[in-house]
């Protein structure tokens, strides 16, 4: 099998393996050294290579005569638009925006925050930054002003590129007021904001700071300056993508240029089985890592056609939306999160809408972002008649740690498993003491160092936080913070997180950060936020609040206010719609809140009374309150 040959080749000589893979990328200076373990936090890939990610995504394909090939198809049921962007057009737009960036005084290493909906200009904004060696940081549109402010502050961005609005469930969501608030509360102030006015809702521009995107592009176009790609070190940052941590402070995952390109370029044909010129659709959002890697960079590096879909799996206009896009654009491989399929299945359990469309172009469906539950996988297999492939990875790794490599030849599918480790990753299961466990035994999932190309070299300006959070607990290994097991055939099963992260509709969120917000309400003495099972979103957060003594405000009012606070500070993406006032929280005798036990009770799972519990009666109390409110299976 090609997979075993590839994995063995990497296992025998990892540097030779990645050195060969690096041959698929164009370099200004070809790396002589493949990996240096003495550099950075755990080593750096291709330390003496020089390259440019925009060049490899666009210029090289145009230079090779593929300028007429579609780079991107923008399919937007929410605006009724479909646009085809060839590689030549994409390059021209990126060059123009790069000229605008230079006019603003941006240069190599400067940061650009991109806060945009799913429109082609967002991709242009990312690649234009890459072209001049600037570092982009995309912020998901569903986050609130405070989250945006944290990112503007931490990156010290010189420029923010944004749009007047996004479109959600038939309504325009104004982005500009969120941006204005973010800048007002951020200590760092970007010099300029470039605002794309959308016809659905215009924004008022702040004289001096805000510049109209289209007008700036027109001026640059008229000036006709050409902007060559700036060579950067392979180890220079391409982007920073913030992801939830165990506190309210998100972690800035850094991605380099060289290793990232080598890994993604290898992954698209070998794991996803997609060739140049073929249409690949990652139905995610550019604000998430799946969007960065598989809407933008991997398909463009590979000379494939990517789809940028501004819509939902349901409601735009119906549960046949995904099938229509596959048929309209001849999608070869689709990649989405299981939650999207659960949403479709709920609306159209028999998949009657799928019968309206010709889905014959589709070869496979890849699922990631959360565990692909066997029931959903079986349903999708029956509807599509293609392999449905789970793959497991994280914002930190940037590409699959484990999967079933369609391109190398599909291995046996085991429902509930993300299949086997990809070359580059030696995955182990350790107990809490750091000892390997027997196959089939649940434990901490770790990856032997060094991480392969494409994975984070560190956090933005926070090496120690990276070491402390990921490398210290199990020396020699990267801690994934996932729990799982490996079976006798080497198949990996990822079951849950070992930290406070929950997965809500494929979106990664920290319950700790929600607790910080709940606790900031003047009437809340203490709280616990847990992720409870949800049939569509996988998990949704629920907050248990203990109110200060002497508060006379009705509990329902406090609950409403706390829900409003989380929406306002973290954003609607948190789906935080359940808050319940309780008399007290169950705790251990040392004062630790027993979140895990509450969650089991709410989810209707079997649970044992923790031996260390301070007062067992509290659990019954909580169960009664939740049952009375119809929350969970309690
Ligand atoms: N801008 C502004 N608001 C946004 C937003 C954006 N880009 N994305 C989501 N929101 C809002 C939604 O409108 C919703 O607001 P509401 O509480 O007022 O209804 C809230 O954030 C929660 O959004 P979401 O979790 O997406 O729920 P939903 O009910 O709108 O849709 C699904 C549910 C399952 C259809 C949707 O989550 C989905 O398509 N998921 C696909 C998986 C995915 O993209 N995963 C990413 C990683 S692969
Ligand atoms: P994110 O960084 O947002 O991509 O979230 C990464 C986390 O999502 C992982 O650490 C897992 O907890 C979870 N996850 C992603 N893909 C899978 C999968 N295929 N199976 C199980 N869990 C997954």
Image (cartoon, rainbow, N blue to C red):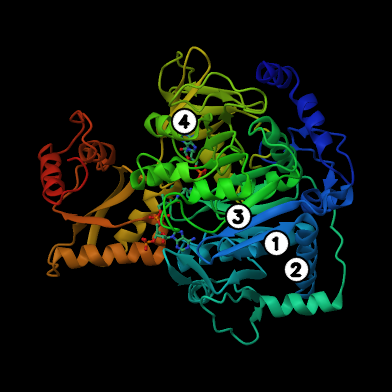
State yes or no: discs 1 and 2 in contact (Cβ < 8 Å). yes
Q: Which residue is mark 1?
A: 124
Residue 183 lies, in percent from the top left, at 54, 74
Q: Left or right? Give the position of 550 relative to 365.
A: left
Q: Is residue 243 left or right of residue 90?
A: left
Viewer-side residue, 263 vs 244: 263
Q: Which residue is mark 4?
A: 381
Eye-nearest disc, 2 or 4: 4
Real-space CA distance between mark 2 and mark 3, rounded to the nearest whole angstrom:
19 Å
Residue at image position (45%, 49%) is 320
Does residue 219 appear anywhere in the picture?
A: yes
Assign a secondary structure to mark 4.
helix
The residue wearing badge 2 is 97
**Badge 2: how crowded within 10 Å, few (<14), some, or many (20+)?**
many
Q: CA distance from mark 2 to mark 4?
A: 43 Å
Q: Is mark 2 within 8 Å of ligand 1?
A: no
Q: Earlier in the sequence, mark 1 or mark 3?
A: 1
């Amino acid at each position: 099998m090609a997979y075993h040959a590839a994995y063995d080749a990497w296992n025998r000589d990892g540097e030779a393996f990645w050195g060969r893979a690096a041959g698929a990328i164009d370099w200004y200076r070809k790396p002589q050294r493949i990996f240096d373990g003495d550099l950075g936090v755990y080593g750096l890939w291709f330390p003496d290579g020089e390259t440019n990610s925009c060049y490899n995504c666009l210029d090289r394909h145009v230079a090779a005569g593929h300028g007429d090939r579609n780079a991107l198809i923008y399919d937007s049921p929410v605006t009724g638009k479909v646009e085809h962007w060839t590689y030549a057009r994409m390059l021209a737009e990126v060059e123009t925006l790069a000229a605008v960036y230079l006019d603003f005084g941006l240069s190599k290493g400067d940061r650009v925050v991109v806060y945009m909906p799913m429109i082609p200009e967002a991709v242009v904004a990312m690649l234009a930054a890459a072209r001049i060696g600037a570092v982009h940081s995309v912020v998901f549109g569903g986050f609130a002003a405070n989250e945006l402010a944290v990112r503007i502050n931490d990156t010290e961005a010189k420029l923010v590129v944004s749009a007047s609005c996004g479109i959600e469930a038939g309504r325009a969501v104004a982005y500009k007021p969120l941006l204005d608030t973010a800048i007002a509360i951020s200590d760092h102030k970007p010099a300029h904001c470039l605002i794309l006015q959308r016809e659905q809702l215009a924004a008022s521009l702040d004289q001096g700071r805000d510049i109209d995107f289209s007008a700036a592009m027109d001026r640059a176009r008229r000036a006709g300056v050409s902007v060559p790609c700036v060579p950067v070190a392979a180890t220079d940052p391409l982007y920073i993508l913030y992801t939830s941590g165990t506190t309210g402070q998100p972690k800035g995952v850094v991605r380099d240029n060289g290793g990232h390109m080598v890994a993604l370029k290898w992954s698209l044909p070998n794991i996803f089985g997609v060739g140049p010129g073929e249409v690949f659709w990652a139905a995610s959002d550019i604000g998430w890592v799946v969007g960065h890697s598989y809407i933008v960079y991997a398909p463009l590096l590979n000379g494939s056609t990517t789809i940028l879909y501004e819509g939902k799996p349901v409601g735009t206009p119906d549960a046949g939306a995904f099938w229509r896009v596959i048929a309209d654009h001849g999608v070869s491989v689709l990649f989405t999160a299981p939650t999207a399929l659960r949403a479709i299945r709920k609306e159209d359990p028999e998949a009657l809408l799928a019968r309206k469309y010709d889905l014959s172009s589709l070869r496979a469906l890849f699922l990631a972002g959360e565990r692909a539950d066997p029931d959903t996988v079986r349903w999708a297999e029956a509807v599509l008649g293609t392999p449905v492939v789970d793959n497991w990875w994280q914002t930190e790794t940037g590409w699959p740690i484990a999967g079933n490599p369609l391109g190398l030849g599909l291995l046996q599918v085991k429902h509930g498993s993300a299949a086997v480790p990809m070359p580059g990753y030696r995955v182990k299961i350790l107990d809490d003491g750091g000892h390997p466990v027997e196959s089939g035994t649940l434990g901490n999932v770790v990856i032997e160092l060094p991480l392969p190309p494409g994975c984070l070299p560190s956090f933005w300006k926070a090496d120690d936080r990276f070491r402390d959070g990921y490398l210290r607990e199990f020396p020699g290994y990267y801690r994934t913070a996932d729990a799982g097991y490996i079976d006798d055939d080497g198949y990996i099963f990822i079951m849950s997180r070992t930290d406070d992260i929950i997965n809500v509709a494929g979106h990664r969120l920290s319950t700790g950060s929600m607790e910080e917000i709940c606790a900031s309400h003047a009437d809340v003495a203490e709280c616990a936020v847990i992720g409870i099972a949800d049939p569509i979103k996988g998990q949704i957060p629920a907050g248990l609040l203990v109110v200060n003594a002497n508060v006379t405000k009705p509990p329902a009012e406090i609950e409403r206010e706390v829900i409003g606070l989380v929406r306002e500070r973290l954003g609607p993406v948190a789906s935080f719609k359940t808050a319940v006032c309780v008399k007290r929280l169950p705790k251990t005798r040392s004062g630790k809140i027993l979140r895990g036990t509450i969650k089991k009770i709410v989810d209707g799972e079997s649970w044992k009374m923790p031996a260390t519990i301070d007062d067992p009666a509290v659990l019954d109390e909580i169960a009664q309150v939740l049952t009375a409110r119809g929350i969970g299976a309690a």
